[in-house]
Amino acid sequence: MISRYTRPEMAAQWTEEAKLGRWLEVELAVCRSWNRAGVIPDEDLAQIEGKAGFSVERTRQIEETTNHDVVAFLTDVAEHIGPASRWVHYGMTSSDVLDTAMGVGLKRAGVVLLAGQAALTSTLRDMALEHAEVACVGRTHGIHAEPTSFGFKLASHAFESRRNEERLARALEGAAVGSLSGAVGTYATLPPQVEAEVMGELGIGVEPAATQVVARDRLSELMNAIAVAGSSLDRLATELRHLQRTELREAEEAFTKGQKGSSAMPHKRNPITAERISGLARVLRGNALASLENVALWHERDISHSSVERVVVPDSFTLIDYLLYKTRSLLEGLVVYPERMLEVLESSHGLVYSQRVLLALVDTGLTREDAYTLVQRNGLASWDSGRPLRDLLGEDTAVTDRLDGQTLDAIFDPQWYTRNLDTVWERVRDL
């Protein structure tokens, strides 16, 4: 991933140095298991553990000849160790080290990822409670529907963020597994005991029936969970982008001192962060599709997945980490305009209260069909004329014969629509 969309802590999990370091961890753990089994002599293990090392540059140099990265790495390690290196990679095939090290990497990167997702949940929870009483209009199909509150909008996103925490945790646990079962997974050259000991030491799970590789449905599930998390950020960003439109301006991104919104128009204050979040979420969804393509491999193994994963796995982890951070920053700097939200709510002349008028008429004994016709007639007249719906209803004897002025006035109250949300706020507090 390019540095523009990269944060150091997550990036550190996916450097070449970190990757080869995990390879070495796996190789040394296997050597220790073979030693306990009586295969590798104590003095050779001491030499292996005392001298084992690698150089990214040297491994790359050797790979120019071998055209095989694991062989190049093993040659590099052997140059550090000396004669005892004959035991390194004993009984193993490349996928044993690659997939097991990948499992370790996923687990470690997952710690960073889950912390970022949890931090976003906390931010959304706090903001939802802060803005619980801020009235605004709810929209369906982009059209004014009924009153809601800005906090309630954010509550939906807070619960979605918590679901993403749970979804990512499950997918990470499923993907953080390894396999040490040999060339076609039959344990012919590596007994199951070695695998069990090594996975226990590394703190990851075991693929119960590997071919030569860990089945890629695991990684694809994780990549799709990351894409879902990114799409959730996209949903939130899209909401905030709409609210910043000039004709609304119910909320807007922070605009810092010295910031410029347009090279041509000095007045512009654009939702650039929200747009960046929406755009990069598309990359995550594309990467998830690539991971689905990786599930179907030939027979016990091919390497068509390998080149893809070198790109999409580090990029997706790096991107979702960055997007979680940027979304949280966007929210923490968000400027909310409660007065403007109320103005926008009232800008449709009270049409948002039409259902409550309908129900009030039904309560008087009018059929739903007749009540609907009556309210719709006045609603359309309000929209066409720009006159408040309350005024038109007060002039319609078919309405006033059933509803007096005090009752009509009480109907046009946005707080009535959020009066039953205490249960939701308790749920939010429990997040």
Image (cartoon, grey):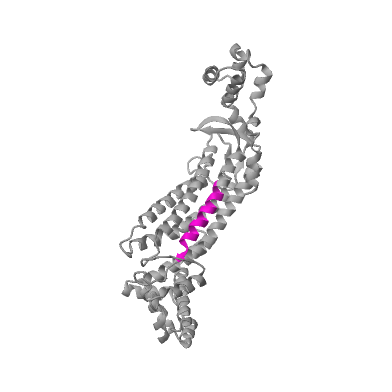
Residue at x 51% of width, y 62% of height: 109
**Residue 53 in the image: above or below residue 223:** below
When asked about the image quadrant of residue 394, the answer is top right
When asked about the image quadrant of residue 312, the answer is bottom left
Residue at x 60% of width, y 34% of height: 148
**Residue 20 in the image: above or below residue 414:** below
Specify the segment rendered in magenta. 160-177
Please state, as top left, top right, bottom left or bottom right, where the N terminus lies in the image.
bottom left
When asked about the image quadrant of residue 368, the answer is top right
Residue 64: percent from left, percent from top: 33, 73
Residue 107: percent from left, percent from top: 50, 63
Residue at x 58% of width, y 50% of height: 121
Instruction: Determine whether, in the image, residue 10 is placed left or right of residue 361.
Output: left
Residue 411: percent from left, percent from top: 64, 24
In this orientation, does residue 4 appear? no
In this orientation, does residue 137 appear? yes
Residue 377: percent from left, percent from top: 52, 17
Q: In terms of secondary structure, what is the magenta stretch mainly?
A: helix
**Residue 358 in the image: above or below residue 164:** above
**Residue 291 in the image: above or below residue 354:** below
Specify whether residue 162 is painted magenta.
yes
